[in-house]
Image (tube, grey):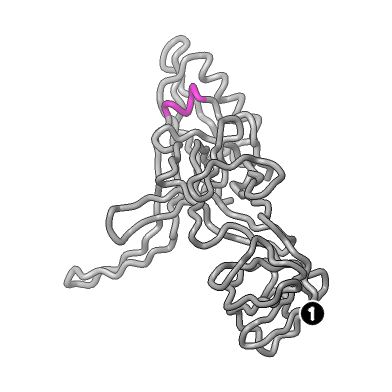
């Protein structure tokens, strides 16, 4: 199945769509009325339907779209006008990593009940034709090369930051704490801060690569010896092309603001059109369902 990144589903149709978030919860009740509830989805999955009267132009545009995406076959972007905006107050970046030297974050929207319950919604389709702002420590960032800057993949919602500084490793010693020697101290890191490692080899290299490690201590004046809190006792890890990098630290808030779309597909391969009057039509309720990306 392909995904149509552009254009977005026609606004003239999406304005009249009915829908919103849906959860999946299993409920078992005993005779006393006491319930056991099992949450099957940690995140909601949105559903929409179109069933309003359509004039000629709107009907033609909708049917052309339905035919082009082959019914349920291909996904596309839908603007949910009831929920499509993010501010720095509810736009967050969740950390993920890779082992190629970058630190990758995922866009999320935070929904807060004001109490103990909340949801972090993964945003995989930030707008690809409207401004998206990324903030680090309250400072607006700019896309492109350079310290603290980033690249945004609007097809996935992944934000890849450029390292503030980096240094080649000359050795790594596994143990209950992990010792790494770097030729320089990237970003003047100290105890309690985070050192991101990548490029190491060996059977257990995944225990250090693509991870930001808490620093227990730093010594030396070049080379620098970093003792990390990560327990790699018994691991086989070799130098390879190991590198240490400084990225955003734990105390630096990462946020974003902008607009987003919902990745959806039609939930039927059949679009039935009822003729209500000359040039007035109604669909026999055609639905759309959110795609997990």
Q: In this view, does 189 lie above or below 232?
A: above
Q: In this view, does 3 lie to the left or right of 9?
A: right
As displayed, is residue 195 above or below residue 106?
below
Give the quadrant of residue 119: bottom left
Residue at 69% of width from left, 58% of height from top?
165
Q: Point out the residue furthest to the right here.
A: 240
Residue 118 lies, in percent from the top left, at: 36, 56
Pick out the residue farthest to the left.
Answer: 32
**Residue 157 can be seen in this image:** yes
- Please say whether residue 65 is one of the residues in the magenta stretch: no
Q: Residue at x 68, y 45 (%)?
A: 1
107 relative position to 205: left or right: left
- How packed is label 1: few (under 14 Cα within 10 Å), some, or many (20 or more)? some
Q: Residue lying at the far front in this picture: please name it.
A: 221
28 or 156: nearer the eye? Answer: 156
Instruction: Report the span colored magenta.
Output: 11-16
Q: Which of the 4 quarters of the picture holds residue 116? A: bottom left
Q: Which of 80 and 23 is in front in this view?
A: 80
Residue indicated by mark 1 = 238
């Amino acid at each position: 199945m392909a995904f149509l990144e552009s254009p977005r589903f026609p606004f003239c149709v999406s304005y009249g769509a009915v829908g919103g978030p849906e959860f999946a919860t299993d409920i078992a009740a005993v005779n006393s009325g006491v319930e056991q509830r099992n949450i099957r989805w940690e995140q909601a999955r949105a559903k929409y339907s179109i069933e309003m009267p359509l004039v000629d132009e709107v009907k033609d545009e909708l049917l052309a779209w339905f035919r082009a995406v082959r019914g349920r076959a291909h996904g596309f972007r839908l603007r949910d006008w009831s929920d499509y905006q993010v501010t720095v107050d509810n736009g967050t970046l969740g950390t993920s990593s890779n082992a190629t030297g970058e630190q990758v974050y995922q866009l999320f929207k935070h929904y807060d009940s004001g109490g103990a319950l909340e949801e972090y919604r993964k945003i995989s389709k930030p707008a690809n034709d409207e401004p998206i702002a990324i903030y680090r420590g309250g400072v607006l960032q700019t896309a492109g090369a350079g310290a603290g800057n980033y690249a945004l993949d609007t097809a996935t919602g992944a934000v890849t930051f450029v390292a503030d500084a980096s240094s080649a490793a000359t050795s790594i010693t596994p143990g209950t704490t992990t010792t790494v020697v770097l030729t320089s101290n990237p970003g003047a890191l100290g105890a309690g801060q985070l050192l991101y490692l990548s490029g190491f080899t060996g059977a257990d290299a995944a225990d250090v690569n693509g991870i930001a490690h808490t620093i227990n201590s730093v010594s030396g004046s070049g080379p620098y010896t970093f003792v990390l809190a990560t327990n790699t006792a018994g691991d086989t890890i070799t130098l390879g092309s190991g590198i240490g990098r400084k990225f955003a630290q734990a105390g630096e808030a990462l946020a974003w603001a902008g607009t987003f779309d919902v990745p959806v597909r039609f939930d039927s391969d059949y679009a039935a059109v009822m003729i209500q009057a000359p040039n007035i039509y109604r669909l026999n309720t055609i639905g759309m369902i959110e795609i997990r990306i």
